[in-house]
Amino acid sequence: MLLESILLVAAAAVTGACVEECLTSYNVPFSVESSPDYNNLTKPYNLRLWYKPAVVVIPDNDKVEEQLHAAMRCASMCGTKVQAKSGGHSYASFSSGGRNGSMVVDLQNLQDINVGGEGTVTAGAGVRIGTLAAAVYARGKRGLAHGTCPGIGVGGHFTHGGFGYQSRAWGLALDHIYALDVVLSNGSMVHATPDKYPEVYYAMRGAADSFGIVTKFWLNTIQAPPSVIDFAFEFAGLYGSAENLADGFLHVQDFVRNSTVVDSNLGFGMYLDGQVLLLRGSYFGDLDHFNSVIAAELLRGLPTPSTSMVNKHTYLESLELLAGGSLSVPAHGYDLHDNFFAKSITVPEHAPLTRENLVSYFSYIIAKGVNPPAPWFSILNLYGGPGSKINAKDLDFAAYSDRKSLWVFQHYVFKEENQTALPQEGMDFITGLSQAVTQNRTDFGAYLNYVDPSLSAEEAYQLYYGQELYDRLVEIKRLVDPYNLFWNPQTIVGFP
Ligand SMILES: Cc1cc2nc3c(=O)[nH]c(=O)nc-3n(C[C@H](O)[C@H](O)[C@H](O)COP(=O)(O)OP(=O)(O)OC[C@H]3O[C@@H](n4cnc5c(N)ncnc54)[C@H](O)[C@@H]3O)c2cc1C
Ligand SMILES: *[C@@H]1O[C@H](CO)[C@@H](O)[C@H](O)[C@H]1NC(C)=O
Ligand SMILES: *[C@@H]1O[C@H](CO)[C@@H](O)[C@H](O)[C@H]1NC(C)=O
Ligand SMILES: *[C@@H]1O[C@H](CO)[C@@H](O)[C@H](O)[C@H]1NC(C)=O
Ligand SMILES: *[C@@H]1O[C@H](CO)[C@@H](O)[C@H](O)[C@H]1NC(C)=O
Ligand SMILES: *[C@@H]1O[C@H](CO)[C@@H](O)[C@H](O)[C@H]1NC(C)=O
Ligand SMILES: *[C@@H]1O[C@H](CO)[C@@H](O)[C@H](O)[C@H]1NC(C)=O
């Protein structure tokens, strides 16, 4: 045992020296453990999973092609696995490699945004979504579908889905992509489109972590609506009866499937944490119609909300509200962190949650989530329902298999800014919370942007991709990354 770990440490040292020497010979900028910026560069968003890369490569914006060409050669030659890092928000710290000893390619110098004339925009892969949204809105009041937290990187977010309240109207973040500049495992940079490198273009839109490094995104944008109705209805004191909660939820589930009141202009989600429950979202339409038709049906028969917010905003104000105030994010030295564990569940559109699923869920929350071992929350976002553009595409369009979902759950337990404190009981609570929903069913999946480090690779393949997409991705992996250079504990493996 001791000998084994000495050998492992020795092997890591040799690999590290090999990569360092190789990168130096090609003049590629990098940081290693002895470098002054190594600690800051490797501090992950999720402090619970702080891995130690062998090397962090930080390509210059104007030399990215030659430097990443060299970096891929060095990684191949020295036997180092590679992962890209954009915003660094991976729930599993996969952008730190997902284990010690990897090569991280930190894209923070790739910050160019060019808004084109025809409603298109190109963005370097180090751009954050808040920065991108503000730039796109500033030129012609246009928008994109994306998540709410402005510090999320485009690199991970746009390549593994990307949900926001715009998504039922406009699709996922990944649906805006029309071309990608990608560095492949052999070091070549390609411009991938539906016609050129179609297999790369396909796999990178949904499973990029397994296939390459996007350096530049080519995106279509959409005219923002003239105004947005933001709403939140908060309920308190509900955690008494699981049956009542289940019945209230079933009404909400009927509402989201009711084409008399719901169309693609409604973005909707629920938030709950054992204290409050919120029904919230954004509506791209008229305030009076929202109040008299949509909110009226949503709230029909439910207890009176303890607080209600319904406000008309510009599209930009709506994004700022959801972002917690501001869309601006520093391009360098971003320093927000959490210490957390999360799991997700995708619920198929054709098989909504049953009363049994819901009673089981709320019973668990009442028993264990009102006085929990650590603070937690659950967010259920609406993907499906009448007119949803998320579900309008299929597996031939992109390597993304969660589309035919009605709901996507996220279960999240946290201790802010504290590397050691998240208790095992908190993680067990979240595992149990998910099991309370999934028990007796096998038709649920999981969302790759809420990547779950507790899954084995085999579980991850089935939950994220399903068999059909997994089989396709294995074939592409064999073609474009035969030696599994792009690796984290859950990436697709072509040849074992
Ligand atoms: C506070 C917070 C709020 C969030 N809100 C939402 C939300 O509203 N909606 C939603 O859908 N998701 C949301 N997420 C999840 C988010 O979409 C994912 O964590 C996303 O993958 C983060 O992208 P990143 O570039 O910041 O992360 P990174 O950690 O840099 O990357 C994540 C993964 O993508 C790979 N990757 C990164 N860049 C590239 C690239 N250029 N080429 C190839 N692979 C790359 C990495 O190797 C890693 O495996 C949220 C996350 C957080 C932490
Ligand atoms: C590391 O980050 C901290 C906090 O943002 C900053 O004060 C410090 O200067 C950084 N150190 C280096 C070497 O960049
Ligand atoms: C990874 O490195 C960290 C920091 O040095 C160390 O605490 C941890 O034990 C290492 N993990 C493994 C699996 O070696
Ligand atoms: C759909 O909404 C309409 C309008 O509020 C309502 O009359 C009807 O009962 C709803 N249908 C279902 C199945 O809930
Ligand atoms: C799962 O099945 C068991 C055994 O039939 C049953 O007791 C339990 O209530 C079911 N749970 C759910 C959530 O359907
Ligand atoms: C982190 O958690 C530990 C254990 O609960 C506690 O002793 C410590 O003060 C916390 N540190 C911070 C910075 O909150
Ligand atoms: C790198 O791989 C791509 C995709 O498989 C291929 O088209 C390209 O020719 C390769 N480049 C070199 C230099 O072999």
Image (tube, grey):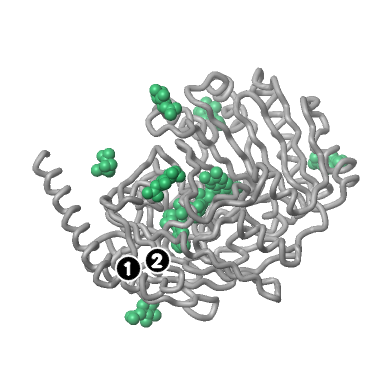
Give whichever of 422, 469 is nearer the camera. Answer: 422
Q: Residue furthest left?
A: 3
Give whichever of 401, 144 is nearer the camera. Answer: 144
Label annotation for residue 28: 1
**Quadrant of residue 146 within the rendered picture:** bottom right
Q: Is residue 92 visible?
A: no
Q: Is residue 478 visible?
A: yes
- In the rendered structure, the answer to whether residue 136 lies left or right of residue 412 reads right
Q: Which residue is mark 2?
A: 59
Whole-percent x, y for residue 229 in the image: 80, 46
Instruction: Name the residue rendered at 46%, 51% in the picture.
Output: 88
**Quadrant of residue 24 within the rendered picture:** bottom left
- In the rendered structure, the answer to whether residue 20 lies left or right of residue 363 reads left
> Whole-Å distance between the Cαs marked 2 and 1?
7 Å
Q: Is residue 424 above or below residue 42?
A: above
Quadrant of the image where one finds ligand 7:
bottom left
- Mark 1: secondary structure: loop
Q: Is residue 425 above or below residue 149?
A: above
Amino acid of disc 2: Pro
Check disc 2: other Cα within 10 Å, few if <14, some if 14-19, many if 20+.
many
